[in-house]
């Protein structure tokens, strides 16, 4: 799991947060802690990256709406971003992030994605294209919007996620 970076990109209300929540939830159910800027019972809500324990225990970092704080313009110099990216692997973190478009994220982070999900939806389905950047493969899949899917959601999707201070 160490250093795996997964980005979900798509327009607002397309299903990005749902996908990353479902991924985080699978690990949470296995006893792996989840750190996030989204209020979810049982998850660790963080305001700063320093809120994550500095150890090598497996952990998930789910960062929703990262365009607010992982844009390269947020760092005064590249040292802070370099430290952050290096820390992801060293601290055994799987990073799940969401935003509208890849260009809204620091370029060095985009280049390190293991997996990218392109997301769109209509009234009946959510469509995902998964790009496996390690193997150079792609796969499409569809989730039908139904009660069974949305019963799994344990967060309020109407709330705006909090800002995370990414200075270490």
Image (cartoon, rainbow, N blue to C red):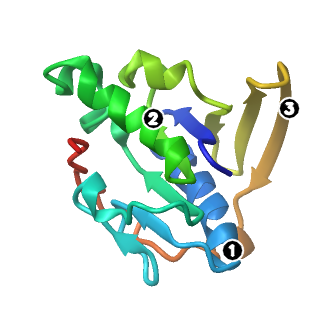
Task: Give the quadrant of the C terminus.
Answer: top left
State the CA–CA distance, disc 1 to disc 2. Answer: 40 Å
Q: Mark 2 points at which residue?
A: 86
Please state which of the two labelled residues, at mark 3 or mark 2, is closer to the viewer.
2
Q: Is residue 159 left or right of residue 19?
A: left
User: Residue 54: x percent and y percent?
Assistant: 39, 60
Task: Give the mark nearest the N terminus, 1 or 2.
Answer: 2
As drawn, 136 above or below 92:
above
Q: Name the residue under label 1.
A: 147
User: Residue 55: x percent and y percent?
Assistant: 46, 62
Disc 1: CA contacts within 10 A as few (<14), some (14-19) or many (>=20): few
Q: What element carries label 2?
A: helix
Q: Is residue 2 visible?
A: yes
Q: Which residue lies furthest to the left in this view?
A: 76
State the CA–CA distance, disc 3 to disc 2. Answer: 28 Å
What residue lies at 67% left-to-right and 32% top-to-bottom? 114
State the CA–CA distance, disc 1 to disc 3. Answer: 25 Å
Task: Give the mark nearest the N terminus, 1 or 3.
Answer: 3
Q: How many marks can you see?
A: 3
Residue 73 found in image quarter = top left
Q: Can residue 99 be seen in this view?
A: no
What residue lies at 75% left-to-right and 33% top-to-bottom? 130
Task: Give the mark nearest the N terminus, 3 or 2.
Answer: 2
Checking the image for residue 139, the label placed there is: 3
User: Residue 70: x percent and y percent?
Assistant: 32, 33
Q: Are marks 3 and 2 in contact (CB under 8 Å)?
A: no
Disc 3: CA contacts within 10 A as few (<14), some (14-19) or many (>=20): few
Please state which of the two labelled residues, at mark 1 or mark 2, is closer to the viewer.
2
As drawn, 40 above or below 74:
below
């Amino acid at each position: 799991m160490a250093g795996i970076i997964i980005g979900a990109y798509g327009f607002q209300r397309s299903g990005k947060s749902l996908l990353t929540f479902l991924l985080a939830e699978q690990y949470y159910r296995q006893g792996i802690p989840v750190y996030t800027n989204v209020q979810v019972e049982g998850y660790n809500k963080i305001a700063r990256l320093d809120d994550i324990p500095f150890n090598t225990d497996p952990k998930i970092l789910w960062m929703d709406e990262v365009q607010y704080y992982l844009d390269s313009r947020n760092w005064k110099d590249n040292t802070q971003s370099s430290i952050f990216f290096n820390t992801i692997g060293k601290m055994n973190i799987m990073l799940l992030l969401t935003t509208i478009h890849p260009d809204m994220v620091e370029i060095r982070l985009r280049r390190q994605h293991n997996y990218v999900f392109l997301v769109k939806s209509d009234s009946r389905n959510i469509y995902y294209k998964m790009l496996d950047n390690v193997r150079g493969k792609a796969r499409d899949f569809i989730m039908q919007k139904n009660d069974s899917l949305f019963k799994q959601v344990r967060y309020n999707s109407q709330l705006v996620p909090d800002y995370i201070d990414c200075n270490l």
